[in-house]
Image: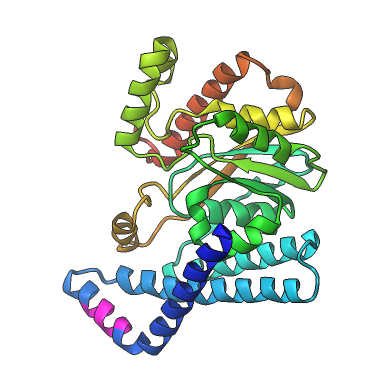
């Protein structure tokens, strides 16, 4: 009943937004362009962001309509059909992002995700990370993902309807009993096949300097040595090892793929996105490194291993963001 009540709010809201953005397109296009030009923003970032929102609303409705069609034809449990729908949706959204903002994503190492089973540990830096990773996993690597996502993302109708029909888990980050959440992650990873990958964002939220400082302070209260070890982090947040360890426990044969990107740094809220879009955005570089399972420790040693991986990723991100020739 809770899901039905949520969808009775979210789907009509997206429909209303789509209709209004369509009917009022001449007005918001002109006003947003005038606002941008008045502020000296010649690339019209406000107009571009509204144009993407316009595309997003209709793609959401198309996805929900397709999902309803699968339900009406008795294919609610057809995983293959829903994975194809997910692949179509992510690809169309990425196309809309390129067309409206000029943003391109380069992922030359996507073959690292093949074959499964694999556990993908992704850096989390922006509002678009879930979309980009879904596009890389499904369209470029041709794999079927099982996602660990925060429950707040259920406000998105497609993620809510299609995401709950696929083997994903929407994590309650405020759960009083984390044991049930971790057991659900073990079950999520169990039975991963050679065309599947489980995806998690070990940082748990988008990285910002204040969040990094708060996270390190909390760690210092419990484990000063770990806080000291992670103090050099300058771009990423300290990873939370429990969720990643639970996925690995659920699928003992899975390799680990660590993924990071640059180009979305600072895209952590809508104001920051507008500032970034005011200039021509640099291509987003999506990088991966595959680690054989035999090289991944288990038990208590896993947390230290994950910290070392995250420090390496932080260094790699810094190198990619630092102009050549700068010390």
Q: Nearer the viewer, residue 165 or 141?
A: 165
Taking the spot 72% from the left edge, 37% from the top edge, the residue there is: 187
Q: Is residue 73 magenta?
A: no
Residue 43: tell me if it is visible. Answer: no
Q: Is residue 30 magenta?
A: yes
Residue 101: tell me if it is visible. Answer: yes
Taking the spot 76% from the left edge, 65% from the top edge, the residue there is: 76
**Residue, far front:** 1
Q: Residue 234: name its quadrant.
A: top left
Magenta region: 28-34
Locate the N terminus by quadrant.
bottom right
For residue 198, side relative to residue 155 (left or right)? right
Whether residue 68 is situated above or below residue 225 in the rendered picture: below
Q: Position of residue 23 (x, y in %)?
A: 39, 89
Taking the spot 57% from the left edge, 24% from the top edge, the residue there is: 306
- Magenta portion: prevailing SS class: helix
Q: Position of residue 33 (x, y in %)?
A: 27, 78
């Amino acid at each position: 009943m809770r899901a039905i009540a949520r969808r009775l709010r979210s789907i009509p809201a997206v429909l209303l937004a789509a209709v209004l953005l369509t009917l009022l397109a001449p007005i918001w296009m002109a006003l947003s362009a005038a606002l941008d030009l008045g502020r000296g923003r010649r690339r019209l970032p406000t107009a571009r962001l509204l144009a993407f929102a316009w595309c997003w609303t209709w793609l959401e409705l198309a996805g929900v309509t397709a999902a309803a069609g699968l339900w009406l034809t008795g294919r609610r449990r057809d995983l293959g059909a829903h994975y194809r729908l997910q692949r179509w949706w992510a690809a169309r959204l990425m196309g809309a992002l390129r067309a409206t903002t000029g943003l391109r994503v380069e992922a030359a190492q996507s073959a690292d995700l093949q074959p499964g089973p694999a556990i993908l540990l992704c850096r989390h830096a922006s509002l678009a990370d879930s979309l980009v990773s879904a596009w890389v996993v499904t369209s470029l690597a041709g794999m079927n993902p099982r996602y660990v996502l925060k429950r707040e993302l259920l406000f998105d109708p497609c993620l809510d309807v299609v995401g709950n029909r696929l083997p994903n888990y929407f994590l309650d980050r405020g759960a009083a009993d984390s044991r049930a959440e971790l057991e659900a992650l073990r079950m999520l990873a169990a039975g991963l096949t050679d065309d599947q990958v489980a995806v998690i964002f070990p940082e748990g939220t988008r990285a910002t300097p204040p969040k990094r400082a708060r996270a390190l302070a909390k760690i210092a209260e419990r484990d000063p040595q770990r806080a000291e070890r992670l103090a050099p982090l300058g771009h990423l947040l300290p990873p939370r090892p429990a969720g990643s360890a639970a996925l690995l426990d659920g699928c003992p044969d899975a390799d680990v793929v660590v993924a990071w990107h640059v180009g979305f740094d600072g895209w952590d809220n809508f104001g920051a996105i507008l500032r970034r879009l005011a200039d021509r955005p640099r291509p987003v570089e999506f990088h991966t490194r595959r680690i054989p399972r035999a090289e991944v420790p288990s038990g208590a040693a896993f947390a230290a291993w994950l910290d070392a991986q995250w420090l390496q990723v932080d260094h790699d991100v810094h190198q990619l963001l630092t102009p050549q020739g700068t010390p």
